[in-house]
Protein backbone atom coordinates (compact mmCIF):
# COMPACT_ATOMS: atom_id res chain seq x y z
CA UNK A 1 0.00 0.00 0.00
CA UNK A 2 1.75 3.12 -1.18
CA UNK A 3 0.69 6.73 -1.38
CA UNK A 4 -0.07 8.51 -4.62
CA UNK A 5 -0.18 12.28 -4.57
CA UNK A 6 -1.75 13.68 -7.69
CA UNK A 7 -1.77 17.36 -8.68
CA UNK A 8 -2.34 18.66 -5.18
CA UNK A 9 -3.37 22.29 -4.65
CA UNK A 10 -4.12 23.96 -1.34
CA UNK A 11 -4.59 27.63 -0.46
CA UNK A 12 -4.76 29.06 3.08
CA UNK A 13 -7.38 31.79 3.60
CA UNK A 14 -9.03 31.32 0.23
CA UNK A 15 -11.45 34.21 0.71
CA UNK A 16 -8.98 36.55 2.41
CA UNK A 17 -7.01 39.17 0.53
CA UNK A 18 -3.73 37.75 1.87
CA UNK A 19 -4.36 34.14 0.82
CA UNK A 20 -1.31 31.87 0.50
CA UNK A 21 -0.90 29.12 -2.04
CA UNK A 22 0.70 26.43 0.14
CA UNK A 23 0.64 23.55 -2.34
CA UNK A 24 0.92 24.17 -6.05
CA UNK A 25 0.41 21.17 -8.30
CA UNK A 26 2.38 18.67 -6.22
CA UNK A 27 2.55 15.10 -7.56
CA UNK A 28 4.68 12.16 -6.48
CA UNK A 29 4.39 8.61 -5.20
CA UNK A 30 5.73 6.80 -2.14
CA UNK A 31 6.07 3.02 -2.21
CA UNK A 32 5.43 0.52 0.55
CA UNK A 33 8.11 0.34 3.23
CA UNK A 34 9.94 3.39 1.85
CA UNK A 35 11.84 5.68 4.20
CA UNK A 36 11.40 9.10 2.67
CA UNK A 37 12.20 12.63 3.75
CA UNK A 38 10.33 15.76 2.76
CA UNK A 39 12.52 18.84 2.97
CA UNK A 40 12.24 22.50 2.14
CA UNK A 41 12.51 25.85 3.81
CA UNK A 42 9.97 27.14 6.34
CA UNK A 43 6.67 27.89 4.61
CA UNK A 44 7.41 25.68 1.62
CA UNK A 45 4.32 23.53 2.28
CA UNK A 46 5.82 20.47 3.97
CA UNK A 47 3.49 20.39 6.98
CA UNK A 48 0.46 21.20 4.80
CA UNK A 49 1.33 18.24 2.62
CA UNK A 50 1.66 15.98 5.67
CA UNK A 51 -1.76 17.08 6.88
CA UNK A 52 -3.23 16.35 3.44
CA UNK A 53 -1.83 12.82 3.66
CA UNK A 54 -3.72 12.39 6.95
CA UNK A 55 -6.90 14.10 5.64
CA UNK A 56 -6.63 16.78 8.30
CA UNK A 57 -6.52 19.23 5.43
CA UNK A 58 -8.60 18.52 2.37
CA UNK A 59 -6.89 19.65 -0.84
CA UNK A 60 -8.70 22.22 -2.97
CA UNK A 61 -7.75 20.35 -6.13
CA UNK A 62 -6.03 17.04 -6.84
CA UNK A 63 -6.06 13.96 -4.66
CA UNK A 64 -4.14 11.72 -2.31
CA UNK A 65 -4.72 8.02 -2.85
CA UNK A 66 -3.88 5.57 -0.08
CA UNK A 67 -4.95 2.09 -1.05
CA UNK A 68 -8.69 2.39 -1.75
CA UNK A 69 -9.11 5.70 0.07
CA UNK A 70 -9.12 8.89 -1.96
CA UNK A 71 -8.65 12.21 -0.18
CA UNK A 72 -10.09 14.91 -2.41
CA UNK A 73 -12.44 17.86 -2.17
CA UNK A 74 -15.20 15.71 -3.65
CA UNK A 75 -14.78 13.06 -0.93
CA UNK A 76 -14.22 15.50 1.92
CA UNK A 77 -17.27 14.34 3.88
CA UNK A 78 -16.65 10.63 3.35
CA UNK A 79 -16.47 8.48 6.48
CA UNK A 80 -13.38 6.88 5.00
CA UNK A 81 -11.35 9.93 6.07
CA UNK A 82 -11.40 8.51 9.59
CA UNK A 83 -10.31 5.09 8.34
CA UNK A 84 -7.42 6.81 6.63
CA UNK A 85 -6.19 8.15 9.97
CA UNK A 86 -5.97 4.57 11.18
CA UNK A 87 -3.72 3.72 8.25
CA UNK A 88 -1.67 6.90 8.13
CA UNK A 89 -0.40 8.04 11.53
CA UNK A 90 0.84 11.58 11.93
CA UNK A 91 3.24 12.54 14.70
CA UNK A 92 3.14 16.31 14.99
CA UNK A 93 5.97 18.63 15.93
CA UNK A 94 6.25 18.64 19.74
CA UNK A 95 3.71 15.81 20.06
CA UNK A 96 4.18 15.81 23.83
CA UNK A 97 1.80 18.78 24.00
CA UNK A 98 -1.14 16.60 22.97
CA UNK A 99 -0.98 14.36 26.08
CA UNK A 100 -3.85 14.81 28.50
CA UNK A 101 -4.80 11.59 30.30
CA UNK A 102 -3.99 10.86 33.95
CA UNK A 103 -1.70 7.95 33.18
CA UNK A 104 0.72 7.08 30.39
CA UNK A 105 -1.09 3.83 29.46
CA UNK A 106 -4.47 5.58 29.27
CA UNK A 107 -3.04 8.26 27.01
CA UNK A 108 -1.51 5.74 24.66
CA UNK A 109 -4.74 3.72 24.62
CA UNK A 110 -6.82 6.83 23.93
CA UNK A 111 -6.27 6.76 20.15
CA UNK A 112 -6.89 3.02 19.95
CA UNK A 113 -10.21 3.35 21.75
CA UNK A 114 -11.24 6.16 19.38
CA UNK A 115 -11.06 3.64 16.56
CA UNK A 116 -13.55 1.36 18.29
CA UNK A 117 -11.27 -1.06 20.17
CA UNK A 118 -12.49 -2.16 23.60
CA UNK A 119 -10.78 -0.86 26.74
CA UNK A 120 -8.82 -3.97 27.74
CA UNK A 121 -7.66 -4.69 24.22
CA UNK A 122 -6.68 -1.03 23.81
CA UNK A 123 -4.59 -1.20 26.99
CA UNK A 124 -2.87 -4.30 25.68
CA UNK A 125 -2.01 -2.48 22.44
CA UNK A 126 -0.82 0.47 24.48
CA UNK A 127 1.54 -1.74 26.50
CA UNK A 128 2.96 -3.22 23.28
CA UNK A 129 3.49 0.24 21.78
CA UNK A 130 5.15 1.47 24.97
CA UNK A 131 7.51 -1.49 24.88
CA UNK A 132 8.35 -0.64 21.27
CA UNK A 133 9.45 2.87 22.25
CA UNK A 134 11.43 1.50 25.19
CA UNK A 135 9.15 2.44 28.08
CA UNK A 136 8.63 -0.40 30.55
CA UNK A 137 5.84 -1.25 33.00
CA UNK A 138 7.07 1.26 35.56
CA UNK A 139 5.76 4.02 33.28
CA UNK A 140 2.22 2.66 32.81
CA UNK A 141 0.61 4.31 35.81
CA UNK A 142 2.68 7.49 35.86
CA UNK A 143 1.09 10.82 34.88
CA UNK A 144 2.57 11.89 31.51
CA UNK A 145 3.13 15.43 32.78
CA UNK A 146 5.71 14.19 35.29
CA UNK A 147 7.95 12.69 32.60
CA UNK A 148 10.91 14.35 30.91
CA UNK A 149 10.51 15.95 27.47
CA UNK A 150 12.07 12.96 25.70
CA UNK A 151 9.93 10.46 27.56
CA UNK A 152 6.80 12.46 26.85
CA UNK A 153 7.62 12.45 23.15
CA UNK A 154 8.09 8.70 23.29
CA UNK A 155 4.65 8.37 24.93
CA UNK A 156 3.14 10.50 22.16
CA UNK A 157 4.81 8.37 19.49
CA UNK A 158 3.58 5.23 21.25
CA UNK A 159 0.09 6.77 21.05
CA UNK A 160 0.35 6.72 17.26
CA UNK A 161 2.10 3.33 17.11
CA UNK A 162 -0.67 1.74 19.17
CA UNK A 163 -3.15 2.60 16.40
CA UNK A 164 -1.00 0.35 14.17
CA UNK A 165 -0.79 2.57 11.10
CA UNK A 166 0.99 1.23 8.02
CA UNK A 167 2.40 4.63 7.19
CA UNK A 168 3.81 6.98 9.83
CA UNK A 169 4.57 10.63 9.16
CA UNK A 170 6.93 12.41 11.55
CA UNK A 171 6.88 16.20 11.44
CA UNK A 172 10.30 17.39 12.67
CA UNK A 173 10.72 14.43 15.04
CA UNK A 174 14.04 15.47 16.56
CA UNK A 175 13.38 19.18 16.97
CA UNK A 176 14.36 20.42 20.43
CA UNK A 177 16.32 17.24 21.26
CA UNK A 178 19.95 16.86 22.24
CA UNK A 179 22.05 14.76 19.78
CA UNK A 180 21.93 11.60 21.93
CA UNK A 181 18.12 11.71 22.35
CA UNK A 182 17.73 12.54 18.66
CA UNK A 183 19.82 9.52 17.74
CA UNK A 184 17.82 7.30 20.10
CA UNK A 185 14.58 8.52 18.56
CA UNK A 186 15.84 8.00 15.03
CA UNK A 187 16.93 4.49 16.02
CA UNK A 188 13.36 3.89 17.09
CA UNK A 189 12.02 5.14 13.75
CA UNK A 190 14.49 2.91 11.90
CA UNK A 191 13.18 -0.04 13.95
CA UNK A 192 9.63 0.78 12.86
CA UNK A 193 10.84 0.89 9.26
CA UNK A 194 12.45 -2.51 9.69
CA UNK A 195 9.11 -3.83 10.95
CA UNK A 196 7.56 -2.94 7.60
CA UNK A 197 6.20 0.54 8.22
CA UNK A 198 6.43 3.22 5.56
CA UNK A 199 8.16 6.20 7.13
CA UNK A 200 7.83 9.81 6.01
CA UNK A 201 9.98 12.32 7.88
CA UNK A 202 9.55 16.05 7.44
CA UNK A 203 12.74 17.78 8.46
CA UNK A 204 15.25 20.57 8.06
CA UNK A 205 18.03 18.37 9.39
CA UNK A 206 20.11 17.34 6.39
CA UNK A 207 22.32 15.04 8.49
CA UNK A 208 19.22 13.07 9.32
CA UNK A 209 18.20 12.99 5.64
CA UNK A 210 21.65 11.83 4.62
CA UNK A 211 21.86 9.15 7.26
CA UNK A 212 18.41 7.62 7.11
CA UNK A 213 16.34 8.55 4.05
CA UNK A 214 16.17 6.38 0.94
CA UNK A 215 14.42 9.04 -1.07
CA UNK A 216 13.96 12.81 -0.69
CA UNK A 217 11.31 15.20 -1.93
CA UNK A 218 12.11 18.90 -1.79
CA UNK A 219 9.35 21.48 -1.78
CA UNK A 220 9.91 25.08 -2.76
CA UNK A 221 7.12 27.67 -2.53
CA UNK A 222 4.56 24.87 -2.55
CA UNK A 223 5.98 23.16 -5.63
CA UNK A 224 7.89 19.93 -5.86
CA UNK A 225 11.38 21.17 -6.72
CA UNK A 226 13.32 17.91 -6.46
CA UNK A 227 12.81 14.16 -6.19
CA UNK A 228 15.68 11.69 -5.79
CA UNK A 229 18.18 10.15 -3.40
CA UNK A 230 19.83 12.25 -0.66
CA UNK A 231 23.17 12.41 -2.48
CA UNK A 232 21.43 13.49 -5.68
CA UNK A 233 19.72 16.21 -3.67
CA UNK A 234 23.02 17.43 -2.19
CA UNK A 235 24.58 17.59 -5.65
CA UNK A 236 21.47 19.38 -6.88
CA UNK A 237 21.48 22.01 -4.13
CA UNK A 238 25.26 22.54 -3.78
CA UNK A 239 24.97 26.25 -4.47
CA UNK A 240 21.67 26.70 -2.72
CA UNK A 241 22.45 28.33 0.60
CA UNK A 242 18.98 27.85 2.14
CA UNK A 243 19.55 24.11 2.59
CA UNK A 244 22.43 23.20 4.80
CA UNK A 245 24.32 20.30 3.21
CA UNK A 246 25.80 17.90 5.82
CA UNK A 247 29.44 18.64 6.65
CA UNK A 248 30.48 15.12 5.67
CA UNK A 249 29.01 15.65 2.18
CA UNK A 250 30.60 19.10 1.92
CA UNK A 251 33.95 17.53 2.73
CA UNK A 252 33.40 14.68 0.25
CA UNK A 253 32.44 17.19 -2.47
CA UNK A 254 35.53 19.29 -1.70
CA UNK A 255 37.76 16.23 -1.89
CA UNK A 256 36.16 15.22 -5.17
CA UNK A 257 36.81 18.69 -6.53
CA UNK A 258 40.48 18.29 -5.57
CA UNK A 259 40.63 15.19 -7.73
CA UNK A 260 39.83 12.44 -5.25
CA UNK A 261 37.45 10.02 -6.94
CA UNK A 262 34.80 9.51 -4.25
CA UNK A 263 31.34 8.04 -4.85
CA UNK A 264 29.09 10.59 -3.13
CA UNK A 265 26.18 8.12 -3.18
CA UNK A 266 28.04 5.85 -0.78
CA UNK A 267 28.84 8.59 1.78
CA UNK A 268 26.26 8.65 4.54
CA UNK A 269 28.47 9.13 7.58
CA UNK A 270 32.04 9.98 8.63
CA UNK A 271 32.84 6.24 8.66
CA UNK A 272 31.63 5.93 5.04
CA UNK A 273 33.84 8.86 4.05
CA UNK A 274 36.89 7.38 5.80
CA UNK A 275 36.23 4.13 3.98
CA UNK A 276 35.89 5.92 0.65
CA UNK A 277 39.18 7.80 1.24
CA UNK A 278 40.94 4.55 2.20
CA UNK A 279 39.59 2.88 -0.96
CA UNK A 280 40.90 5.76 -3.07
CA UNK A 281 44.31 5.59 -1.30
CA UNK A 282 44.54 1.84 -1.84
CA UNK A 283 43.79 2.33 -5.52
CA UNK A 284 46.49 4.96 -5.93
CA UNK A 285 49.27 3.47 -3.84
CA UNK B 1 -9.79 29.33 13.50
CA UNK B 2 -6.87 31.66 13.00
CA UNK B 3 -8.85 33.36 10.27
CA UNK B 4 -11.45 34.43 12.83
CA UNK B 5 -11.87 38.17 12.29
CA UNK B 6 -14.87 39.00 14.45
CA UNK B 7 -14.03 41.98 16.63
CA UNK B 8 -10.36 41.94 15.73
CA UNK B 9 -8.80 45.40 15.44
CA UNK B 10 -8.76 46.59 11.85
CA UNK B 11 -6.57 49.51 10.94
CA UNK B 12 -8.67 52.27 9.38
CA UNK B 13 -8.75 56.02 9.66
CA UNK B 14 -12.33 56.82 10.67
CA UNK B 15 -13.96 59.18 13.15
CA UNK B 16 -14.56 56.30 15.57
CA UNK B 17 -11.01 54.96 15.22
CA UNK B 18 -9.66 58.37 16.19
CA UNK B 19 -11.70 58.64 19.38
CA UNK B 20 -9.90 58.33 22.72
CA UNK B 21 -10.08 54.73 23.97
CA UNK B 22 -11.17 55.88 27.46
CA UNK B 23 -14.02 57.84 25.96
CA UNK B 24 -15.05 54.92 23.76
CA UNK B 25 -15.16 52.50 26.68
CA UNK B 26 -17.15 54.93 28.82
CA UNK B 27 -19.63 55.69 26.02
CA UNK B 28 -20.00 51.99 25.26
CA UNK B 29 -20.91 51.32 28.89
CA UNK B 30 -23.46 54.17 28.78
CA UNK B 31 -25.01 52.72 25.62
CA UNK B 32 -25.16 49.23 27.13
CA UNK B 33 -26.90 50.55 30.24
CA UNK B 34 -29.39 52.37 28.00
CA UNK B 35 -30.02 49.21 25.96
CA UNK B 36 -30.66 47.22 29.11
CA UNK B 37 -33.20 49.56 30.64
CA UNK B 38 -36.32 47.41 31.11
CA UNK B 39 -39.39 49.24 29.82
CA UNK B 40 -42.84 48.17 30.91
CA UNK B 41 -44.55 49.42 27.77
CA UNK B 42 -43.95 47.59 24.52
CA UNK B 43 -44.52 50.81 22.62
CA UNK B 44 -41.53 52.54 24.22
CA UNK B 45 -39.39 49.42 24.06
CA UNK B 46 -40.08 48.92 20.35
CA UNK B 47 -39.59 52.56 19.51
CA UNK B 48 -36.27 52.70 21.35
CA UNK B 49 -35.07 49.39 19.92
CA UNK B 50 -35.70 50.75 16.45
CA UNK B 51 -33.78 53.92 17.27
CA UNK B 52 -30.89 51.92 18.77
CA UNK B 53 -30.73 49.74 15.68
CA UNK B 54 -30.62 52.71 13.33
CA UNK B 55 -27.93 54.38 15.49
CA UNK B 56 -25.94 51.16 15.59
CA UNK B 57 -26.06 50.65 11.83
CA UNK B 58 -24.94 54.27 11.31
CA UNK B 59 -22.12 53.72 13.82
CA UNK B 60 -21.02 50.54 12.03
CA UNK B 61 -21.06 52.28 8.67
CA UNK B 62 -19.07 55.26 10.02
CA UNK B 63 -16.50 53.00 11.67
CA UNK B 64 -16.43 50.73 8.58
CA UNK B 65 -17.01 47.60 10.61
CA UNK B 66 -17.99 44.58 8.54
CA UNK B 67 -21.71 44.05 9.22
CA UNK B 68 -21.74 40.73 7.36
CA UNK B 69 -19.00 39.46 9.65
CA UNK B 70 -21.24 40.25 12.61
CA UNK B 71 -24.06 38.13 11.23
CA UNK B 72 -21.66 35.28 10.53
CA UNK B 73 -20.38 35.36 14.09
CA UNK B 74 -23.92 35.45 15.47
CA UNK B 75 -24.70 32.14 13.78
CA UNK B 76 -23.32 30.40 16.88
CA UNK B 77 -26.12 31.94 18.96
CA UNK B 78 -28.84 29.67 17.58
CA UNK B 79 -28.64 27.25 20.48
CA UNK B 80 -28.90 30.09 22.96
CA UNK B 81 -31.92 31.53 21.10
CA UNK B 82 -33.69 28.16 21.14
CA UNK B 83 -33.03 27.65 24.87
CA UNK B 84 -34.24 31.16 25.67
CA UNK B 85 -37.43 30.69 23.65
CA UNK B 86 -38.04 27.30 25.27
CA UNK B 87 -37.78 28.90 28.72
CA UNK B 88 -40.24 31.63 27.80
CA UNK B 89 -42.64 29.17 26.16
CA UNK B 90 -42.63 26.39 28.75
CA UNK B 91 -42.17 28.27 32.03
CA UNK B 92 -45.63 29.52 33.09
CA UNK B 93 -45.88 33.28 33.49
CA UNK B 94 -48.92 35.11 34.87
CA UNK B 95 -47.84 38.40 33.34
CA UNK B 96 -48.56 37.26 29.78
CA UNK B 97 -51.57 39.03 28.32
CA UNK B 98 -51.20 38.89 24.52
CA UNK B 99 -53.38 36.44 22.54
CA UNK B 100 -52.62 32.72 22.40
CA UNK B 101 -50.39 31.84 19.43
CA UNK B 102 -50.86 28.07 19.58
CA UNK B 103 -51.52 25.21 22.01
CA UNK B 104 -49.30 22.26 22.90
CA UNK B 105 -51.61 19.80 24.72
CA UNK B 106 -52.96 21.85 27.64
CA UNK B 107 -50.17 24.43 27.43
CA UNK B 108 -51.17 27.75 25.89
CA UNK B 109 -48.30 29.51 24.19
CA UNK B 110 -48.92 33.23 24.07
CA UNK B 111 -47.32 35.75 21.73
CA UNK B 112 -45.64 37.26 24.81
CA UNK B 113 -43.18 34.36 24.91
CA UNK B 114 -41.93 35.21 21.42
CA UNK B 115 -41.97 38.96 21.99
CA UNK B 116 -40.05 38.81 25.26
CA UNK B 117 -37.40 36.32 24.12
CA UNK B 118 -37.06 38.23 20.82
CA UNK B 119 -36.62 41.47 22.76
CA UNK B 120 -33.86 40.00 24.92
CA UNK B 121 -32.08 38.49 21.90
CA UNK B 122 -32.29 41.80 20.05
CA UNK B 123 -30.72 43.60 22.99
CA UNK B 124 -27.98 40.99 23.25
CA UNK B 125 -27.20 41.31 19.55
CA UNK B 126 -26.99 45.07 19.96
CA UNK B 127 -24.59 44.67 22.87
CA UNK B 128 -22.40 42.27 20.91
CA UNK B 129 -22.38 44.71 17.98
CA UNK B 130 -21.33 47.54 20.27
CA UNK B 131 -18.48 45.46 21.69
CA UNK B 132 -17.47 44.54 18.16
CA UNK B 133 -17.35 48.22 17.16
CA UNK B 134 -15.18 48.95 20.22
CA UNK B 135 -12.70 46.13 19.65
CA UNK B 136 -12.54 46.65 15.88
CA UNK B 137 -11.75 50.34 16.23
CA UNK B 138 -9.46 50.35 19.29
CA UNK B 139 -5.93 49.01 19.40
CA UNK B 140 -5.59 46.39 22.17
CA UNK B 141 -2.79 48.38 23.78
CA UNK B 142 -4.90 51.56 23.83
CA UNK B 143 -7.64 49.55 25.45
CA UNK B 144 -5.34 48.38 28.23
CA UNK B 145 -4.02 51.90 28.77
CA UNK B 146 -7.63 53.04 29.06
CA UNK B 147 -8.40 50.31 31.62
CA UNK B 148 -5.32 51.32 33.56
CA UNK B 149 -6.55 54.91 33.50
CA UNK B 150 -9.98 53.84 34.80
CA UNK B 151 -8.33 51.88 37.58
CA UNK B 152 -5.99 54.74 38.48
CA UNK B 153 -8.13 55.89 41.46
CA UNK B 154 -6.93 52.67 43.11
CA UNK B 155 -3.49 54.24 43.28
CA UNK B 156 -4.80 56.47 46.06
CA UNK B 157 -5.40 53.42 48.24
CA UNK B 158 -1.98 52.46 49.54
CA UNK B 159 -2.23 48.66 49.70
CA UNK B 160 -3.68 48.53 46.17
CA UNK B 161 -1.25 51.10 44.73
CA UNK B 162 0.22 48.91 42.04
CA UNK B 163 -2.85 46.86 41.20
CA UNK B 164 -3.92 49.17 38.35
CA UNK B 165 -0.73 48.63 36.37
CA UNK B 166 -0.63 44.91 37.11
CA UNK B 167 -4.24 44.41 35.97
CA UNK B 168 -3.56 46.41 32.82
CA UNK B 169 -0.42 44.40 32.09
CA UNK B 170 -2.30 41.12 32.65
CA UNK B 171 -5.03 42.33 30.29
CA UNK B 172 -2.59 43.34 27.58
CA UNK B 173 -0.80 39.99 27.80
CA UNK B 174 -4.13 38.15 27.67
CA UNK B 175 -5.14 40.11 24.56
CA UNK B 176 -1.75 39.54 22.96
CA UNK B 177 -2.01 35.80 23.49
CA UNK B 178 -5.51 35.28 22.06
CA UNK B 179 -4.25 34.61 18.49
CA UNK B 180 -1.45 32.39 19.84
CA UNK B 181 -3.92 30.34 21.86
CA UNK B 182 -6.23 30.07 18.86
CA UNK B 183 -3.34 28.70 16.81
CA UNK B 184 -2.47 26.33 19.64
CA UNK B 185 -6.10 25.16 19.82
CA UNK B 186 -6.07 24.44 16.11
CA UNK B 187 -2.79 22.54 16.41
CA UNK B 188 -4.06 20.40 19.30
CA UNK B 189 -7.37 19.77 17.52
CA UNK B 190 -5.47 18.47 14.49
CA UNK B 191 -3.16 16.36 16.64
CA UNK B 192 -6.11 14.79 18.47
CA UNK B 193 -8.00 14.30 15.18
CA UNK B 194 -5.04 12.28 13.93
CA UNK B 195 -5.59 10.07 17.00
CA UNK B 196 -9.16 9.48 15.90
CA UNK B 197 -10.98 12.19 17.86
CA UNK B 198 -13.98 13.54 15.97
CA UNK B 199 -14.89 17.02 17.12
CA UNK B 200 -17.88 17.34 14.80
CA UNK B 201 -19.70 14.03 15.20
CA UNK B 202 -20.84 11.73 17.98
CA UNK B 203 -23.13 11.95 20.98
CA UNK B 204 -22.93 14.26 23.95
CA UNK B 205 -20.60 11.97 25.94
CA UNK B 206 -18.21 11.54 23.01
CA UNK B 207 -18.11 15.25 22.34
CA UNK B 208 -17.43 15.96 26.00
CA UNK B 209 -14.48 13.54 25.82
CA UNK B 210 -13.23 15.35 22.71
CA UNK B 211 -13.40 18.70 24.49
CA UNK B 212 -11.41 17.29 27.44
CA UNK B 213 -8.76 16.06 24.99
CA UNK B 214 -8.54 19.62 23.71
CA UNK B 215 -8.82 21.65 26.92
CA UNK B 216 -6.24 19.85 29.08
CA UNK B 217 -3.32 20.08 26.62
CA UNK B 218 -4.34 23.68 25.91
CA UNK B 219 -4.21 24.56 29.62
CA UNK B 220 -0.90 22.74 30.08
CA UNK B 221 0.73 24.58 27.19
CA UNK B 222 -0.81 27.93 28.25
CA UNK B 223 0.53 27.49 31.80
CA UNK B 224 3.97 26.52 30.49
CA UNK B 225 3.92 29.54 28.20
CA UNK B 226 2.92 31.83 31.05
CA UNK B 227 5.76 30.57 33.19
CA UNK B 228 8.24 31.07 30.34
CA UNK B 229 6.89 34.57 29.72
CA UNK B 230 7.10 35.47 33.42
CA UNK B 231 10.71 34.28 33.55
CA UNK B 232 11.55 36.15 30.33
CA UNK B 233 10.09 39.33 31.84
CA UNK B 234 12.03 38.88 35.08
CA UNK B 235 15.36 38.34 33.31
CA UNK B 236 14.74 41.50 31.31
CA UNK B 237 14.34 43.42 34.57
CA UNK B 238 10.58 43.94 34.59
CA UNK B 239 9.38 45.47 37.83
CA UNK B 240 5.63 46.09 38.12
CA UNK B 241 6.27 48.58 40.90
CA UNK B 242 8.58 50.80 38.91
CA UNK B 243 7.45 54.25 37.81
CA UNK B 244 7.09 54.23 34.05
CA UNK B 245 6.51 56.74 31.32
CA UNK B 246 4.67 56.18 28.02
CA UNK B 247 5.71 56.71 24.46
CA UNK B 248 2.10 57.06 23.30
CA UNK B 249 -0.34 59.11 25.32
CA UNK B 250 -4.12 58.95 25.06
CA UNK B 251 -5.54 62.36 24.14
CA UNK B 252 -9.04 63.76 24.43
CA UNK B 253 -9.91 65.73 21.25
CA UNK B 254 -12.85 67.66 19.77
CA UNK B 255 -14.09 64.39 18.27
CA UNK B 256 -14.45 62.98 21.75
CA UNK B 257 -16.48 65.99 22.85
CA UNK B 258 -18.86 65.53 19.90
CA UNK B 259 -19.21 61.78 20.52
CA UNK B 260 -19.67 62.35 24.24
CA UNK B 261 -22.36 65.00 23.72
CA UNK B 262 -24.25 62.84 21.22
CA UNK B 263 -24.31 59.81 23.51
CA UNK B 264 -24.99 61.90 26.63
CA UNK B 265 -28.00 63.55 24.96
CA UNK B 266 -29.30 60.17 23.81
CA UNK B 267 -28.78 58.68 27.27
CA UNK B 268 -30.59 61.61 28.93
CA UNK B 269 -33.49 61.05 26.51
CA UNK B 270 -33.66 57.36 27.44
CA UNK B 271 -33.71 58.26 31.14
CA UNK B 272 -36.58 60.71 30.57
CA UNK B 273 -38.49 57.99 28.69
CA UNK B 274 -37.70 55.52 31.47
CA UNK B 275 -39.17 57.86 34.08
CA UNK B 276 -42.26 58.39 31.90
CA UNK B 277 -42.49 54.62 31.45
CA UNK B 278 -42.59 54.04 35.19
CA UNK B 279 -45.02 56.86 35.91
CA UNK B 280 -47.29 56.58 32.83
CA UNK B 281 -46.81 58.61 29.67
CA UNK B 282 -48.35 59.89 26.45
CA UNK B 283 -46.55 57.09 24.63
CA UNK B 284 -49.37 54.86 25.84
CA UNK B 285 -51.20 56.07 22.78
CA UNK B 286 -48.77 54.25 20.46
CA UNK B 287 -49.34 51.09 22.45
CA UNK B 288 -53.10 51.40 21.93
CA UNK B 289 -52.52 51.87 18.20
CA UNK B 290 -50.65 48.56 18.15
CA UNK B 291 -53.49 46.94 20.03
CA UNK B 292 -56.10 48.20 17.56
CA UNK B 293 -54.10 46.65 14.72
CA UNK B 294 -54.35 43.33 16.59
CA UNK B 295 -50.66 43.02 17.45
Image (spheres, coloured by chain):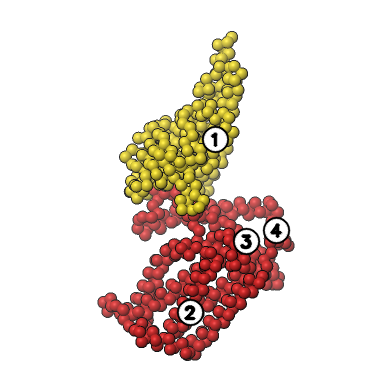
Q: Residue A205 got which mark?
A: 1
SS under mark 4: loop
> In this rendering, would A89 be left or right of A146?
left
Residue B28 appears anywhere in the view: yes
- In the rendered image, the residue lying farthest to the left is B105
Distance CA(mark 1)–CA(mark 2) = 65 Å
- Mark 3 vs mark 4, foreground winner is 3
- Kindly report which numbered mark, 4 or 2, lies closer to the viewer in this rendering: 2
Residue placed under numbered mark 4 in the picture: B239
Q: Earlier in the sequence, mark 2 or mark 3?
A: 2
Q: Chain of mark 1?
A: A
Q: Using the image, name the chain to which the residue with label 3 belongs.
A: B
- Determine which residue is flagged by label 2: B48
- In the displayed structure, A182 sits above or below B142; it is above
Q: Quick one: quadrant of the C terminus of chain A?
A: top right
Residues under numbered marks 3 and 4 in contact, where contact means CB atoms less than 8 Å apart:
no
| Residue depicted at x 63% and y 63% | B142
Numbered mark located on residue B141 in the image: 3
Labels 1 and 2 positioned on one and the same chain = no
Q: Residues within 10 Å of mark 2 (few under 14, many from 20)?
A: some
- Element type at mark 3: helix
Residues indicated by labels 2 and 3 sit on the same polypeptide chain: yes
Q: What is the spatial separation of the Cα atoms under label 3 and label 4, in whole angstroms? A: 19 Å
Q: Do discs 1 and 3 belong to a common subunit?
A: no
Chain A: what color? yellow
Do tag 1 and tag 3 residues touch (Cβ < 8 Å)? Answer: no
Residue occupying image coordinates x 33% and y 83%: B99
Chain B appears in which tint? red
Q: Position of residue B72 (x, y in %)?
A: 44, 62
Amino acid sequence: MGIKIENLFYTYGKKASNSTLALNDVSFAINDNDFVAIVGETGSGKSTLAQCLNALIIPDKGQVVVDDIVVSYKNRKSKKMRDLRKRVGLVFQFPEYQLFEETVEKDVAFGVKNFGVKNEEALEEAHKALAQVGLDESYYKRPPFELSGGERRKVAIAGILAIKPDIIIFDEPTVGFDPASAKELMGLIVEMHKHGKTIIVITHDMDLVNEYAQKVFMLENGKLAFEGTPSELFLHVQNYDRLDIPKVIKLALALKEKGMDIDINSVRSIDDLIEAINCWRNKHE
Amino acid sequence: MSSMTFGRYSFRDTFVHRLDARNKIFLMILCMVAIFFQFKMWSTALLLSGLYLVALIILMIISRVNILQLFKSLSGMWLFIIILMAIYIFVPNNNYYLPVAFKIASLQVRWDAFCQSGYIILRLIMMISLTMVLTSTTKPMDMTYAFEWFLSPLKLIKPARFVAHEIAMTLSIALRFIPTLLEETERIMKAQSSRGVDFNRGGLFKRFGAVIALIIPLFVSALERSEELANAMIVRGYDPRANRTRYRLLRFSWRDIIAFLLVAIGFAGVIVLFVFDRTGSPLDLIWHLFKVKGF
